[in-house]
Image: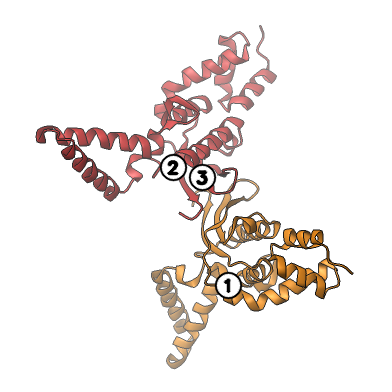
Chain colours: A orange, B red
Amino acid sequence: MEITAAMVKELRERTGAGMMDCKRALAESAGDFEKAIEYLRVKGLSKAAKRAGRKTAEGLIISYIHPGNRIGVLLEINCETDFVARTEQFQQLARNVAMQIAAASPLGVSREDIPAEVIEKERELFRNQAREEKKPENVIEKVVDGRVEKFYAETALLDQLYVKDNEKKIGDLLKETIAILGENIRIARFARFQLGQ
Amino acid sequence: MEITAAMVKELRERTGAGMMDCKRALAESAGDFEKAIEYLRVKGLSKAAKRAGRKTAEGLIISYIHPGNRIGVLLEINCETDFVARTEQFQQLARNVAMQIAAASPLGVSREDIPAEVIEKERELFRNQAREEKKPENVIEKVVDGRVEKFYAETALLDQLYVKDNEKKIGDLLKETIAILGENIRIARFARFQLGQ
């Protein structure tokens, strides 16, 4: 099957991947679009790590307001070019991340964004719990470490399980989209308001 | 003209004002809806001050995203009851305030919300400017006071001129809506994101 310029253009518009990558993906998958997208995804995953350092100055500001107007989220999500920012995949990622924040109420984007004093307070709490449960003194710090790990998994956005698919974390969702779109993507910041809190 | 229960109900739905106030407004304006709304507004203004202390635990979380998704605002605005929160007037006020924040980029809701160090930095800047303009030393602090006043009018949301009607401040817009709806209203907080800033 011949790979036409129109097909390459369409795949590029659907995935945001580079021109040459789209051409190769279509050739490898004999013009089958779904297979070509899958090819880009798999191929892209190995590249995603390399893209992590690249500059992200474009992107979107978007919001999600939960029905009833009692919870709302404002989100800045960055990528490298305005072209990718306007793709359906990027916009969908943005909407899904905003909805995640509304539903799962993270305290920060990554672990590093959660204030040290919050973690220290949690450690103290877990330590007291472990003592009340009569854990031996020599294992208490291990128990506490385990619970802090769980606390991070619940409160750092990138570590949270994706509410729409419990098989992956938000960080994985991000990496997948980086693989498909071929650009570094960064969740820059968010605000989450809940009425009266 | 007879004032029916249906008329009172409709006025109440349109304005959110109390049942007895609506009845009186319709009686005073011989059943003319526009005049009745005006009556409620004027009558309400003198009451607005009294309402300022009342508890605001209801309201809305809303957002405004500027076309192009490069500027976005998240806003919490409170009133006393869910009934008023659901009125068209209250929702319109919320939308207008959110749009104001997007357009005029305030630093805080009221003067008190603008950090003292920001004001001190501005004072220093204005003082140096006044000296460069060779103002006499004995009037410099007066000049600086005047410029700080202008700075507040530009950066405190309630002091800002309403972008859609330069004849009034956002604080006036709020008072007018309090007068019409008969409940205390409070702009609780906002976040304003601009891409890459």
Q: Secondary structure at mark 2?
A: loop
Give the residue number, with chain letter if any, for mark 1: A51
Question: Alpha-carbon distance for marks 3 and 2?
Answer: 13 Å
Question: The numbered mark 1 sits on a residue in which chain?
Answer: A
In the image: residue B92, left or right of residue B130: right
Whether the residues at callouts 3 and 2 have beta carbons within 8 Å, the answer is no
Crowd band around label 2 with a 10 angstrom C-alpha radius: few (<14), some (14–19), many (20+): some
Q: Nearer the viewer, residue B64 or B111?
A: B64
Earlier-in-chain disc, 3 versus 2: 3
Q: What's the residue type where badge 1 is placed?
A: Arg
Give the residue number, with chain letter if any, for mark 2: B105
Residue at (73%, 58%) from the top-left corner? A13
Q: Judge depth for marks 3 and 2 and give the one in front.
A: 2
Question: Alpha-carbon distance for marks 2 and 1?
Answer: 34 Å
Give the residue number, with chain letter if any, for mark 3: B75
In the image: residue A44, left or right of residue A7: left
B11 lies above or below A99: above
In the image: residue A52, left or right of residue B9: left
Q: Are marks 1 and 3 on the same chain?
A: no
Residue B114 lies, in percent from the top left, at: 34, 45
Question: The numbered mark 3 sits on a residue in which chain?
Answer: B
Whether the residues at callouts 2 and 1 have beta carbons within 8 Å, the answer is no
Q: Secondary structure at mark 1?
A: helix
